[in-house]
Amino acid sequence: MKILLLHSTFWPLIGGTESIMRQHAEMLAEHGHDVRVVTGHGQPSNDQYHVEVLKELSPGFPLNLQAKRALDHGQTDQHLNTFTHLLTETLKPYYDQADVVITHGAVTTHFNLALTQAVWKLAGSKPTIAWVHDFTPANKNYALPNPGHMPWALMSQAHPQIKYVAVSGQRQQEITQTLGLEESQVPVIENGIDFNELLGIEPAFKSWLERIDFLARDIIFFYPTKLLQRKNIDQAILWADAIKKAGLNPLLLISGSQDVYGTAGASYEDYLKYFPKQLGLENEVFYLNDYNDEIGPVWQQAFRISDVLLFSSGYEGFGIPPLEAVATRIPCWCQPLGTIPDWLAPAMTFVKTPEEAAGAAQELVSNPVFQARKRIWQEHNWNYLYDKKIWPLLQSLLG
C-alpha cells in the first residue's frame, strides 16, 4: 500500500509520538509498503521511506502563530480560516497519492486546530486512521478555552470516516466515552519497542535469532566459554536437557571459541558438538562460534538478549562471567566455586545437578518480573504488532 503518515513533527525530535511514528515508518517500509511521512520538522532515519518537510506544518509557521493568538483566548478569526484552507490545499495532493492516511495527534489534540479542520475535510477522500497517543478532551492538564464550540468541539466528535486507534486500554475508554463509540470500533494497538536499536542488536544476529525462533523460548541461556574440559560444557547441556524435560522450551547459546592450545583435543570438541544431538537438543543448543562467518562475534549482544548466564565451570583461577552477569543485571547460575567472593555469592544461584537446574528454571518462569519481561519481548515487538494488529487493520480499511 501507499501509506501517508502525518504529524507536525518527526524524528530526530525526541518525543514519544515522534519515536513511535518513526518506528511505524520503518516497520511499514520493511513489510513492503510505500511510506511517505509529511511533517513540519524531521528527516528520514533510513532510505526505506520518504519524508516531505512542509513549512506549513511547522509549529512556528507564521500563519499558525497568528491563528493561535485568537484560539488561546477562545476565539477564532480569519487567520484560522485562511490557515485551514492553506493546509487543506497543501495536503490534498499527498492524500490523492496515498491508499491510507495515518495521522498522529492531528484529530485528537488541540495544538494545531487548523490541521484538525483540514484533516476532517480531507478524511472523506481517503481511508484515514487517527492514531491516538494523547486525547485532549479527557486530559485535565489542558484547560480548553471554549471546548463546546468549533473548532475545539471537533476533538469530541467522531468523524464517521475516520478509524480511531488507541495506544492503550485507558485511551480506548476515554475515546469511546467521549465520542460515543463502542469498544469494538476503537481497536487498541499498543506501542512497540525496537529491541534491536535499544540493545544494539545487529541485523545479521537479529535475522539468525529469528530463524531459531528465540522469541518463543521460555528461557534463553548464555554460556560464554572456550571449549575446555574444566568448563563443564556438557554439564550445562545436561541442565538444558533437564529443563526441556520439565516442560519448558529453553535456548542455550554457547560462545564456544576453540582452544587454540589444544589442551582438550579435537575429540573433546567433536564430543561437545555431538552431545546435544544425542540428547535431541539440536534446536536448543547452539555454538555461536560456528556461525562467525554469518553473524560475526556477538558475545556482547548475546549477553543483552539472554535471561540467564550459565557458568557450570568446575575450576577457575578467577571467573569473570559471574561479575559480568551481575554488572549486566542478569541472573547467574553456577556451580559453587572457591573463587567467588563472599560478597558476590548472594547474587548467584548455585546449581549442582540437572534436577536443581530444572527447579531453578521453574521458579524463574513463575517470577512476575520475568513473566513481564517475556511478554514485552513477545507482544511488544513490531513484527508481532504488525502481523496480529496493524496489517489486519490496514486490510479492513481497504476491504
Image: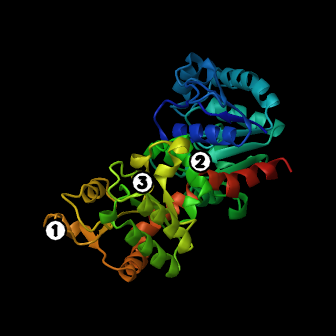
Q: Nearer the viewer, mark 2 or mark 3?
A: 3
Residue 378's place in the image compared with 240, above or below, is above
Residue 362's place in the image compared with 159, above or below, is below
Query: Front-most of 288 and 146?
Result: 288
Q: Name the residue that disc number 2 marks.
A: 207
Circles 3 and 1, Cβ within 8 Å, touching? The answer is no
Residue 53's place in the image compared with 317, above or below, is above
Quadrant (top left/top right/bottom left/bottom right) for the N terminus: top right
Under tag 1, what secondary structure?
loop
Residue 88 image offset from top left, x and y in percent: 74, 26
Q: Residues under labels 3 and 1: Cα distance?
A: 24 Å
Amino acid under disc 1: Gly
Q: Name the residue that disc number 1 marks.
A: 338
Query: Front-most of 7 and 1?
Result: 1
Residue 123's place in the image compared with 324, above or below, is above
Q: Is residue 14 shown to the viewer in this render?
A: yes
Amino acid under disc 3: Ser
Q: Quadrant of residue 97?
A: top right
Residue 353 image offset from top left, x and y in percent: 34, 80
Amino acid under disc 2: Ser
